[in-house]
C-alpha cells in the first residue's frame, strides 16, 4: 500500500474515531469503475494465448480498521475485475512462397463470480454477483456471536471469452495442364477460452459485551493516602478513547490510537491504526480466553485492557469510565469507591486530625477481638481475586 497524503489529525477523546464515512463515500464512488477496469498484471499476448489479462480481486471490506470489522455495522466488500482479449493474426509462408493467414478474433466476453464467506463453521454464498460493493453475505445476527472470530471471504469465478477462428490456407498445387501456383482454401469456426479466478481476504470480527473488573481497589475501598483506580476491561474489540470521571468531573481523557488513510494500487481506501501514549496507565493484551460462566457472562474474550489512574480524594466517590471503540460504539461503567484514612484508638486520624467521626473519611480503629480476623478477610479477598483471574484465563 502507498500512504495517502492525508493523516487524520483528530482531537483527543472527541473525534479519534476514524472517518469511516469518508472512506465509505470514496469507495462507493470508486466501485462502479472497478468492474471492467484496467489490467494491473498484464502479460504479453500471442497467437497461442490471446488473453492479455483476466484478473479479479477482493480489495477491502469497509467500514474496517486494519483487518477488523464490527458485528454491529453492515460491512461491504469492494472488488475489481479486469480482462483483455486481443486479436491475433499469424502468417506463414511455405517453401514455395505461398502465404497462409490465421486469425483469432474476440467476439464476446463475460464473467461469472460467486462470493463465499466462512464464519464460525458456517458458510454463506452469494452467487452470480454483479454489483459493487457487495454486502457481506453473513447476517449481522450471525456476526453478533463472534468470539473475536475471523471471517474469511473468497471470490471465485470464471472468465468466458468467445473467439472466431478463420484461416486462409495457401498451398502449392498444379492443375491437369501443368500450371502450378498457390491455391487458397478458407475455413473457420468458433471456440471458447475460460480463465478461472480466485481471491480471498480475512478479517477479525469485533463485537459482544464489555465486562469490567475493578482490580484497584478490589474491595471498593482503599487507603486515602495513595488512591489508585484500575479497571480491567474484557472485550472483543479495540478501543479508541477512554475518559475517567471522578464525581462527574473529568479526571483524564485520552486517545488510545491514531489513524491514517492509505490507498492501494486500485485507489481503494483503507484505514490503519497505531497505538499512542495516553496520559494514563494503559495496557492492551490480545489474549483469547474461554472462561467458564461467571455471573451473566458466558463469553469468550479476545482483548484485555487495563486502565490505571491515580487521584487525590477522600471519602465516598463515584468513578466512571467511558470507552469508545473504533467503530463509534460507547460503553460506560460507574463504580462507588471509598477512600479512608486509618485511625488510632478511634481518637486520632493518621493525618493528625481529631475530627474523625465521619466513617466515610476515616476507618474506625480495629478492636482487639477483630485483629485476628483482619488478615483472614484480606487473605480471602486476595484469594478470590486470584481465583477470578485463574478462571478467566482457563483455556
Image: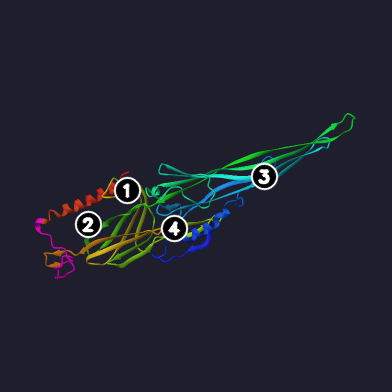
- The kind of secondary structure element at disc 3 is strand
* Image quarter in which the C terminus is found: top left
The residue labelled by disc 2 is 219
Q: Earlier in the sequence, mark 3 or mark 1?
A: 3
x, y percent for residue 242: 35, 61
The residue labelled by disc 4 is 274
Tell me how far mark 4 sits from mark 3, CA to CA.
Answer: 50 Å
Tell me how far mark 1 sits from mark 2, CA to CA.
Answer: 24 Å
Does residue 320 appear in the picture of this structure? yes
Q: Residue furthest right?
A: 177
x, y percent for residue 150: 42, 47
Between tags 2 and 3, which lies in front?
3
Q: How many marks?
A: 4
- State yes or no: residue 352 in magenta: yes
Magenta: main secondary structure: loop
Tell me how far mark 2 sits from mark 3, CA to CA.
Answer: 78 Å
Query: How are the colours assigned in the image?
Result: rainbow
Q: Which of marks 4 and 3 is nearer the N terminus?
A: 3
The residue labelled by disc 1 is 299
The magenta stretch spans which residues? 349-369
Tell me how far mark 3 sits from mark 1, CA to CA.
Answer: 57 Å
Amino acid at each position: 500500500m502507498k500512504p495517502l497524503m492525508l493523516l487524520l489529525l483528530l482531537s483527543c477523546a472527541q473525534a479519534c474515531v476514524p472517518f469511516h464515512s469518508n472512506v465509505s463515500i470514496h469507495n462507493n464512488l470508486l466501485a462502479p469503475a472497478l468492474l471492467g477496469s484496467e489490467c494491473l498484471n498484464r502479460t504479453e499476448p500471442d497467437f497461442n494465448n490471446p488473453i492479455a489479462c483476466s484478473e479479479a480481486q477482493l480489495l477491502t471490506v469497509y467500514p474496517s480498521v486494519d483487518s477488523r470489522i464490527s458485528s454491529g455495522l453492515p460491512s461491504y466488500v469492494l472488488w475489481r475485475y479486469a480482462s483483455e482479449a486481443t486479436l491475433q493474426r499469424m502468417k506463414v509462408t511455405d517453401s514455395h512462397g505461398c502465404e497462409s493467414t490465421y486469425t483469432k478474433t474476440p467476439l464476446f466476453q463475460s464473467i461469472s463470480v460467486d462470493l463465499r464467506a466462512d464464519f464460525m463453521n458456517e458458510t454463506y454464498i452469494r452467487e452470480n454477483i454483479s454489483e459493487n460493493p457487495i454486502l457481506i453475505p453473513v447476517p449481522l445476527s450471525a456476526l453478533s456471536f463472534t468470539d473475536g472470530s475471523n471471517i474469511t471471504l473468497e471470490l471465485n469465478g470464471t472468465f468466458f471469452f468467445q473467439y472466431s477462428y478463420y484461416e486462409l490456407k495457401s498451398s502449392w498445387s498444379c492443375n491437369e495442364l501443368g500450371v502450378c501456383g498457390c491455391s487458397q482454401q478458407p475455413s473457420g469456426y468458433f471456440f471458447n477460452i475460460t480463465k478461472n479466478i480466485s481471491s480471498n481476504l480475512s478479517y477479525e470480527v469485533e463485537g459482544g459485551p464489555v465486562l469490567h473488573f475493578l482490580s484497584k481497589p478490589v474491595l471498593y475501598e482503599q487507603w486515602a493516602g495513595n488512591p489508585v483506580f484500575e479497571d480491567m476491561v474484557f472485550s472483543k474489540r479495540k478501543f479508541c478513547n477512554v475518559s475517567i470521571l471522578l464525581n462527574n468531573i473529568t479526571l483524564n481523557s485520552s486517545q488510545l490510537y491514531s489513524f491514517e488513510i492509505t490507498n492501494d494500487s486500485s485507489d481503494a481506501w483503507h484505514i490503519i491504526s497505531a497505538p499512542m501514549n495516553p496520559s494514563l496507565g494503559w495496557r492492551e493484551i490480545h489474549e483469547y480466553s474461554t472462561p467458564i460462566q461467571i455471573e451473566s457472562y458466558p463469553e469468550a474474550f479476545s482483548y484485555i485492557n487495563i486502565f490505571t489512574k491515580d487521584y487525590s480524594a477522600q471519602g465516598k466517590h463515584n468513578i466512571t469510565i467511558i470507552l469508545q471503540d473504533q467503530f463509534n460504539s460507547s460503553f460506560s461503567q460507574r463504580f462507588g469507591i471509598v477512600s479512608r484514612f486509618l485511625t488510632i484508638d478511634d481518637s486520632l486520624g493518621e493525618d493528625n486530625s481529631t475530627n474523625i467521626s465521619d466513617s466515610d473519611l476515616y476507618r474506625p480503629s480495629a478492636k482487639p477481638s477483630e485483629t485476628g480476623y483482619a488478615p483472614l478477610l484480606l487473605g480471602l479477598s486476595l484469594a478470590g481475586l486470584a481465583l477470578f483471574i485463574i478462571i478467566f484465563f482457563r483455556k
